[in-house]
Image (spheres, grey):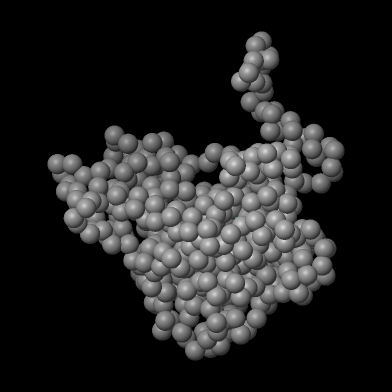
């Protein structure tokens, strides 16, 4: 065998590749599906398959150092008297205390606040660290109702009703017993140390009409002050968005299949839902048909890594994006310096996805006090703020190159696709042609 793992004369099967073989062997050994964190790992059409058409003779670019390119966004001004006013169109996605350590939640709040944006609670409720360090905090109402506290509905700045997540539309949450510490157990009203599987649907709903009733209740409880977000995993997006808007949502949060998770079956992560690239145009179409595009804001997530991803999502019609996995990496997850410690638990820096296991040497996806103490929330918050600043600067750079004085002025017309698949899903022309598969004939 050579150093790069190539075996001369031996041929690897494309169908039964090394991952498929390893998974069959693992399943034969353990007799249960694999559970892991992170998001889908296989390649699906994504923002990398799109390119911007920068300005040239036919369009006029803006000067980076002299001409403004604004980034502010208002979320939830359809019905709420106190919509969120954010400085940047990038928010921190809902990630539960339980999945994440208390210092990690605090660091997310610090980083988001430093950049004038929002962070979000998660399954399991609101922690004091998080509330205390988040200027703008979105409170999730989930099917499990774990940690749900009516007082916290009044202490938050917006409410997000979670119908589903991109990593597992139709599935419920999981928190393995090793992460159910005394504090997590108390907040969730669960026994310590026992695996918890949370509900895949809300206990008091049997259909979309019940969503309307729930939104009405939440508005009454909070005096019509707080915006109500509805979060959905991307599947039948056109209909789901239309129904959520009809039910009264102020903001739609749309999470594509690449979206992160703390703990889900691998088969679910990789095989359920549609890529965010395909979902955004469906959501925009539904909003436009209801004359609600930009009146009900669209926040999208699922594999956002760079300012290019942010700019492309906005150009396709989103009002803001949300990040999960990238925020954890910014805090220090999978840091190269921890490689020996990842190796000691059978992983490697850049690959570690056993976030369900609670053994994270970075102190992020753990409830072990000694491990959690390794994450300095002040430093983590600073790193996250730096990352958010970079994403924002990159987004502005691309918007200015397209001649836009606000990042929201980016539009599908600024984009082309590198592949036929991406062109069809994103509904933009294949590069060098005017062909939008399924829309134009050539
Ligand atoms: C560690 C972790 C915990 C999460 N917990 C929740 C949760 O409690 N509620 C929820 O709606 N989504 C949860 N999510 C999903 C995120 O809110 C978001 O939809 C997803 O991470 C976005 O995709 P990205 O990670 O590729 O940015 C979680 C994601 C991660 C990585």
In the rendered image of this protein, does residue 434 appear above or below residue 104?
above
Q: Quadrant of residue 374?
A: bottom right
Q: Pick whichever, 317 or 396, lies toward us.
A: 396
Left or right, residue 107 beside residue 87: right
- Where residue 163 sits in the image (x, y, percent)? 60, 67
- Where residue 391 sits in the image (x, y, percent)? 40, 52
Q: Pick whichever, 137 or 277, lies toward us.
A: 137
Q: Pick whichever, 52 or 384, lies toward us.
A: 384
- Where residue 141 sits in the image (x, y, percent)? 61, 73
Q: What is the quadrant of the C terminus in the image?
A: top left
In the rendered image of this protein, does residue 273 appear above or below residue 85?
above
In the rendered image of this protein, does residue 363 appear above or below residue 97?
above
* Residue displayed at 61% across by 57% down: 375
Residue 172 appears anywhere in the view: no
Left or right, residue 157 beside residue 1: left
Count the numbered circles shown. Answer: 0
Residue 47 appears anywhere in the view: yes
* Residue displayed at 74% across by 33% down: 22
* Residue displayed at 78% across by 70% down: 182
Q: Pick whichever, 99 or 222, lies toward us.
A: 99
Q: What is the quadrant of the N terminus in the image?
A: top right
- Where residue 195 sits in the image (x, y, percent)? 80, 61
Q: Quadrant of residue 335?
A: top right
* Residue displayed at 43% across by 65% down: 114
Q: Residue furthest left?
A: 57
């Amino acid at each position: 065998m050579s150093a790069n793992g190539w075996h001369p004369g031996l041929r690897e099967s494309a169908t039964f590749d090394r991952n498929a073989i390893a998974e069959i062997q693992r399943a034969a050994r353990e007799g249960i599906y694999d559970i892991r964190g992170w998001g889908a790992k296989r390649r699906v059409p994504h923002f990398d398959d799109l390119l911007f058409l920068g300005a040239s003779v036919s369009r006029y670019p803006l000067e980076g150092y002299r001409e403004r390119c604004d980034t502010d966004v208002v979320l939830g001004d359809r019905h709420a008297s106190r919509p969120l006013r954010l400085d940047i169109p990038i928010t921190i996605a809902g990630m539960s205390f339980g999945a994440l350590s208390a210092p990690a939640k605090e660091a997310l709040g610090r980083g988001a606040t430093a950049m004038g944006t929002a962070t979000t609670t998660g399954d399991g409720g609101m922690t004091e660290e998080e509330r205390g360090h988040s200027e703008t905090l979105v409170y999730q109402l989930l099917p499990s109702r774990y940690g749900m506290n009516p007082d916290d509905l009044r202490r938050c700045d917006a409410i997000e009703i979670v119908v589903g997540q991109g990593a597992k539309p139709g599935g419920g949450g999981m928190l393995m017993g090793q992460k159910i510490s005394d504090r997590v157990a108390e907040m969730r009203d669960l026994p310590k140390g026992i695996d918890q599987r949370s509900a895949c649907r809300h206990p008091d709903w049997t259909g979309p009409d019940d969503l309307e009733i729930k939104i009405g209740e939440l508005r009454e409880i909070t005096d019509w002050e707080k915006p109500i977000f509805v979060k959905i995993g991307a599947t039948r997006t056109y209909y789901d968005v239309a129904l959520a808007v009809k039910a009264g949502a102020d903001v739609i949060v749309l999470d594509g299949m690449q979206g992160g998770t703390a703990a889900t079956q691998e088969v679910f992560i990789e095989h359920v839902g549609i890529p965010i690239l395909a979902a955004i145009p469906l959501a925009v179409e539904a909003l436009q048909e209801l004359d609600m595009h930009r009146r009900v804001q669209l926040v999208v997530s699922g594999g956002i890594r760079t300012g290019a991803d942010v700019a492309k999502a906005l150009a396709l019609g989103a009002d803001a994006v949300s990040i999960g996995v990238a925020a954890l990496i910014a805090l220090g997850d999978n840091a190269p310096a921890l490689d020996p410690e990842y190796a000691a638990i059978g992983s490697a820096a850049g690959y570690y996805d056993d976030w369900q296991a609670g053994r994270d040497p970075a102190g992020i996806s753990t409830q072990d006090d000694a491990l959690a103490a390794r994450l300095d929330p002040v430093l983590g918050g600073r790193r996250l703020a730096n990352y958010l600043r970079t994403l924002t600067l990159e987004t502005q750079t691309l918007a200015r190159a397209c001649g836009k004085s606000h990042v929201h002025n980016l539009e599908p017309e600024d984009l082309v696709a590198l592949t036929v698949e991406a062109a069809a899903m994103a509904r933009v022309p294949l590069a060098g042609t005017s062909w939008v598969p399924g829309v134009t004939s050539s």
